[in-house]
Amino acid sequence: FSVTFGNHDDEFDKTRKELYDIVKSIPHSLISTTEGIFGVTNFMLTLGPAGSDATDRVLYLFDSNAYTTIDGMKGYDHIRIDQIEWYRQQSRKFTAGNGGKPVPSLAFFHIPLPEHKETARDDAAILTGTRGEVVCSPDMNSGLFVSMKEMGDIQATFHGHDHNNDYAVYWNKIFLVYGRFSGCDTVYNDLKPNGARVIE
């Protein structure tokens, strides 16, 4: 198992780094970190055939941070430029090692991208599941979706944040997918019962 952090994790008595150390200490935890870039839980997991060094899939996990610190702006934080550049560098390496062909990849982060708001206004977007609230994304668009399109490897993004959404939408040839709220009861959680999204 592994996790990546969202906006509420360090609002109590532990920092993100302290939380990371706790999760890292749990048996079978695959959590990792990338030093030198913003956030704590930015890392990759690779999937491939047993007994082989081949990489069939790359799972990118991004720390989507918490709340913006930009003067004059409010709301949720954005995935930072250095995080995006880290992803682009890794993607280029995997593509180069795969004969110039992008390795099919998935991305996981808590707060949805601003592009997710666009899907609600796009009549051509194919939406499946429950849309029980508006998308609560950052107001600042730092360009992660465009980078994913340019790299050509990300097939789908997965996130949470909006407790009453569990839908998937296909937009500009990338799936934008909510998980199913799976925690304990919070301020709001109208989707019952709690659950999880399974990727086959």
Image: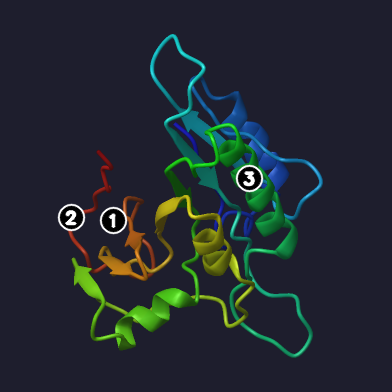
Residue under label 2: 193
- Looking at the rendered structure, the kind of residue marked 1 is Arg
The numbered dot on residue 180 is: 1
Q: Quadrant of the N terminus?
A: top left
Pointer 3: what residue?
92
The residues tagged by marks 3 and 2 sit, at their Cα atoms, a distance apart of: 41 Å
Q: Nearer the viewer, residue 145 or 188?
A: 145
Q: Indicate the position of residue 51 as horizontal and vertical percent values.
A: 44, 9
Neighbour tally class for label 2: few under 14, some 14-19, many 20 plus, Cα within 10 Å:
few
Q: Quadrant of residue 44?
A: top right
Kindly indicate the quadrant of the structure image that contains residue 143.
Answer: bottom right
x and y percent of residue 67 in the render?
64, 72
User: Do the numbered discs 1 and 2 sit on residues whose CB atoms are within 8 Å?
Assistant: no
Give the residue at x 72% y 64%. Answer: 81
Q: Is residue 120 visible?
A: yes
**Is residue 106 rendered to the left or right of residue 175?**
right
Does residue 190 sit above or below 4 in this rendering? below
Question: From the viewer's perspective, is residue 105 above or below residue 50?
Answer: below
| Residue 42 visible in the shown view | no
Name the amino acid type tagged 2.
Pro
